[in-house]
Image (cartoon, rainbow, N blue to C red):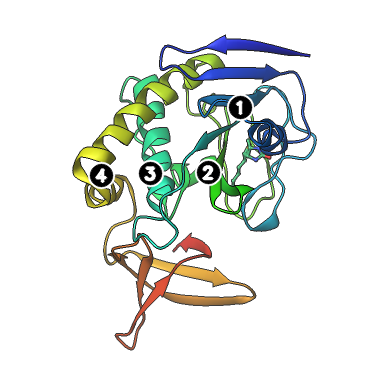
Amino acid sequence: MSKQIKLDSGYKVIEFEELDSTMITLKELAVKGCDIKTVVCAKKQKRGRGRQGRSWVSPKGNLYYSFLRNPEDKNSKNMFAPVFIVALTIVDTIKTISNNKIIPTIKWPNDILINRSKIAGILIENINLTANRNLLNIGIGINIVSNPINTLYPSTNLKKENINTSYREVLQIFFDKLILFEKIYISKGANEIYKMWSIFAHKIGDPISVKIGGRKIFGTFNGLNEEGGLLLLNELGDIKVILAGDIFLL
Ligand code: BTN
């Protein structure tokens, strides 16, 4: 059973009581040619997906949704810009909902934290429509009333942080803000987005470790390269560009 809600931003939310994963349902709709402003939201997911093949525990009470976006050109240096736009949008949404009392932070590339604990996660998958037409399937999970325990990173939820809201309020504000950040991206470019992202992210010199496969490497955060890759400075003074991996703040 599903319900449809039209947001002021023009996005059309299809809300389900329960799904395996909003990523799967949105992909099916996209393949059938749904509008680009379609959002699939579920009150509960049976097989929520996280990054790096992990699962995303999805009980009732939190927010789970997926939406579409056109990708950047495959060889463009802005290919990863959507990741940063979406992370910034979530930070600004939570900031607004808390009346600026809570300023979330971002852990590269797109984990959203409050007091170093994860409050929201973003998963971006590619939908291959035809040989030369792809769409991004962007899935977001926001912990509103509960959070999993025994996870790779500590996590929290909005209620625990004294932010009372509903998933519909979060959706409304998120898509209003998404439109604003997309406009900034179009008018000022990816560098402006990286600059704004950096305000909320770890600072240059912060000690971090990166887990790539079974290996962990240590160093300090040294900013982003022009594609949004993380620059890790090791103790020998070498800089390594990280394009994928799990980052831990030390
Ligand atoms: C992460 O591992 O940090 C990303 C988590 C993304 C979870 C969301 S919940 C809505 C959408 N549907 C899923 O199955 N996963 C994403």
Q: Which residue is drawn at 63% across and 26% down?
A: 40
- Nearer the camera: disc 1 or disc 3: 1
Dot 3 alpha-carbon crowd within 10 angstroms: few under 14, some 14 to 19, many 20 or more: many
Q: In the image, what residue type sits under mark 1?
A: Cys
Mark 1 — residue?
34
Say if disc 1 is inside 8 Å of ligand 1.
Answer: no
Q: Residue at x 59, y 49 (%)?
A: 126
Mark 2 — residue?
118
State whether residue 44 is above or below residue 185. above
Task: Assess whether mark 4 and mark 3 are in contact (beta carbons under 8 angstroms).
Answer: no
The residues tagged by marks 4 and 2 sit, at their Cα atoms, a distance apart of 20 Å
Mark 4 — residue?
196
Dot 4 alpha-carbon crowd within 10 angstroms: few under 14, some 14 to 19, many 20 or more: some
Which of 99/30 is in front? 30
Say if disc 2 is inside 8 Å of ligand 1.
Answer: yes
Task: Assess whether mark 2 and mark 3 are in contact (beta carbons under 8 angstroms).
Answer: no
Mark sitting earlier along the chain (1/4) = 1
Mark sitting earlier along the chain (1/3) = 1
The residues tagged by marks 3 and 2 sit, at their Cα atoms, a distance apart of 9 Å
Asked where in the image residue 38 lies, by quadrant, the reply is: top right
Q: In the image, what residue type sits under mark 2?
A: Lys
Mark sitting earlier along the chain (4/2) = 2
Mark 3 — residue?
105
Q: Which residue lies furthest to the left in this view?
A: 188
